[in-house]
Amino acid sequence: MGNKLKTPELGFYYHYKHDSNGEVNNYAYEVLNIAHHTEIDGLDESAMVVYRPLYDASVYKIGKHWDVRSLQMFMESVIKDGKKMLRFTKIIDSKVISKLEKIKEIMYGK
């Protein structure tokens, strides 16, 4: 009954809707942790990724709330423009990470 699903590393991710020609933080998120829904049986089934937007998303506007998504859905692939890609992709570019760190501080504080 242990977690068989791969879990994302903490850090910054782009959602597949990110536009690389747009602002660095469009559809950018910070993964904060993994949580479990208390009303769903099974650790694999109840696993949720806790993450927050680094842009002016609706959950931010209503009170700096965070998002949750099932771990399975967070880690799955999607089809966009006929191509299979990850729903969320970890950001590893140090320059982009530095910019997102600054945006995070402005939005959420230290």
Image (cartoon, grey):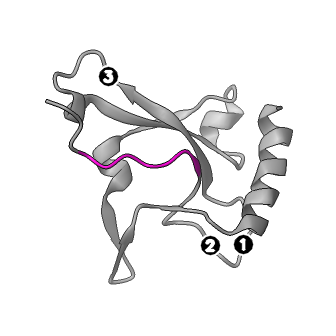
Give yes or no for residue 107 being in the magenta stretch.
no
Identified by mark 2, the residue type is Asp
Location of mark 3 (residue): 37
What is the CA distance from the residue labelled 3 to the residue labelled 2?
Answer: 32 Å
For the C terminus, which image quadrant? top right
What is the CA distance from the residue labelled 3 to the residue labelled 1?
Answer: 35 Å
Magenta span of residues: 5-11
Q: Do the CB atoms of the residues marked 2 and 1 lie less than 8 Å apart?
A: yes
Residue extending furthest toward the front: 2
Residue extending furthest toward the bottom: 82
Quarter of the image for residue 10 reads top right
* Residue at left offset 58%, top offset 67%: 18
Give yes or no for residue 7 being in the magenta stretch.
yes
Number of residues whose C-alpha sits closer than 10 Å to that of mark 1, classed few (under 14), some (14–19) or many (20 or more) = few
* Residue at left offset 16%, top offset 22%: 41
| Rendered image: mark on residue 22 | 1
Callout 1 secondary element: loop
Location of mark 2 (residue): 19
Lateral position of residue 96 relative to residue 48, left or right: right
N-terminal of the pair, mark 3 or mark 1, is: 1
Q: Position of residue 109 (x, y in %)?
A: 83, 32
Q: Main secondary structure of the magenta part?
A: loop
Identified by mark 1, the residue type is Gly
Q: Do the CB atoms of the residues marked 3 and 2 lie less than 8 Å apart?
A: no
Lateral position of residue 65 relative to residue 40, left or right: right
N-terminal of the pair, mark 3 or mark 2, is: 2
* Residue at left offset 69%, top offset 30%: 64
Callout 3 secondary element: loop
For the N terminus, which image quadrant? top left
Q: Is residue 94 above or below residue 20?
A: above
Callout 2 secondary element: loop
Q: Of 32 and 17, which appears nearest the observer?
A: 32
